[in-house]
Image (cartoon, helix red, strand yellow):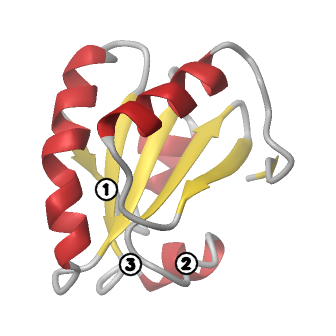
Amino acid sequence: MIHEVTDENFEREVADSDVPCLIEFTGAWCSLCEKLLPTLEELAGRYDGRVKFCTVNTDDQRDLRIKFAVAALPYLVYVANGQMTPLFDEYVTLERLQERLDYMLAGNQAPTTRPL
């Protein structure tokens, strides 16, 4: 399941989540975002209960677009324990994304990890 996140429900859905979240920032016009959707749906099933998969429509959610400094789509960010880690700002294969998720779930951090 992929959860829709808005400026209004971000705290409840992501910041206060009991499990890490993977957020895909997308736009209605983004063909690469649409191409990525089956990968995210597949991984959402594999990581059910361990990672919450979320989507943010940047056309409608201006505050989140600014908060996360979204400059390109698709943009994937991992959020856990009050920290955010940008993962990819491009189309990514299932294998690459799964590898990065496993790395983050193992408790590792990336140089780009920063407070939420």
Decide: marks 1, 3 in contact (CB < 8 A)? no
Which image quadrant for residue 53? top left
Image vertical order of residue 31 relative to residue 108, above or below: below
Nearest the eye: 114 or 60: 114
Residue matched to label 2: 70
Nearest the eye: 102 or 59: 102
Residue matched to label 3: 61
Nearest the eye: 97 or 78: 97
- Mark 2 or 3, which is nearer the eye? 2
Question: Quick one: SS at disc 3?
Answer: loop
Q: Position of residue 59 (x, y in %)?
A: 30, 86
Q: Is residue 20 left or right of residue 51?
A: right
Residue matched to label 1: 55
Say which amino acid is labelled 3.
Answer: Gln
Say which amino acid is labelled 2.
Answer: Val
Q: Residue at x 18, y 30 (%)?
A: 42
Q: Is residue 106 left or right of residue 73?
A: right
Q: Quadrant of the N terminus?
A: top left
Q: Answer with mark 2 or mark 1, whichever residue precedes in sequence.
A: 1
